[in-house]
Amino acid sequence: MAKVIIALGNDISTDDIYPGRFMATVLPSETPQFAFSDRTDFNARLRAREFPAGSIIVGGENFGCGSSREQACSTLKGYDLTIVARSISRIFLQNSINLGLKVVLCPTMEASEGDELEITETSVMNKTSGKAFAQVKMPASRKGIMDAGGLIPYTRTLLKARR
């Protein structure tokens, strides 16, 4: 079980997640400090490491819309967060998988900040409200890459297995 650390609405853009003015910083070890920079209170709490690994950001429709910047994913992965959203933009979803950011598509999700969620293979259970929500099953190939920590670790594992 993990706690929702922020519940966001629809159309959360990559510029909200990782503002374009920080694009000169691209190293995954440095990008996390800029996560949600324009949401100053939330950014300060992230930087203070107030949230344990696996904490959840809940999004509405079209999470990660906007530009194709993969830093929007690496900045969140740097805090080992999980994204549960009603829908995720195509490019953000693929970048998340490639970088190993945990994402869950849950079209009917209802949760608020502070709610406790339990994520299973098929559903997201909001333990606070007592409601369960079906999640969209990730194709096995995409899930394998995400579970391996991203495309590079996944490929390394495949190459080692072939030796």
Image: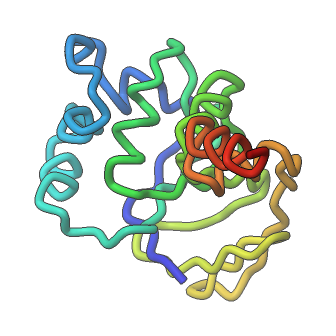
Q: Nearer the viewer, residue 106 or 120?
A: 120
Q: In this rendering, is residue 134 above or below 59?
A: below
In screen coordinates, is 72 left or right of 162?
A: left
Q: Position of residue 126 (x, y in %)?
A: 64, 79
In screen coordinates, is 5 left or right of 118?
A: left
Q: Position of residue 28 (x, y in %)?
A: 31, 34
Q: Nearer the viewer, residue 17 or 151?
A: 151
Q: Nearer the viewer, residue 36 or 26?
A: 26
In screen coordinates, is 154 left or right of 20?
A: right
**Looking at the rendering, which quadrant does residue 148 occupy?**
bottom right
The residue sitting at 49% across, 67% down in the picture is 112
The residue sitting at 70% across, 60% down in the picture is 109
The residue sitting at 58% across, 29% down in the picture is 95
Instruction: Give the position of the N terminus as an image quadrant.
Output: bottom right
Q: Nearer the viewer, residue 148 or 43?
A: 148
Total numbered badges shown on the rendered structure: 0
Q: In this rendering, is residue 33 above or below 148?
A: above
Q: Position of residue 121 (x, y in %)?
A: 80, 71
The residue sitting at 36% across, 28% down in the picture is 16
Q: Position of residue 144 (x, y in %)?
A: 75, 52
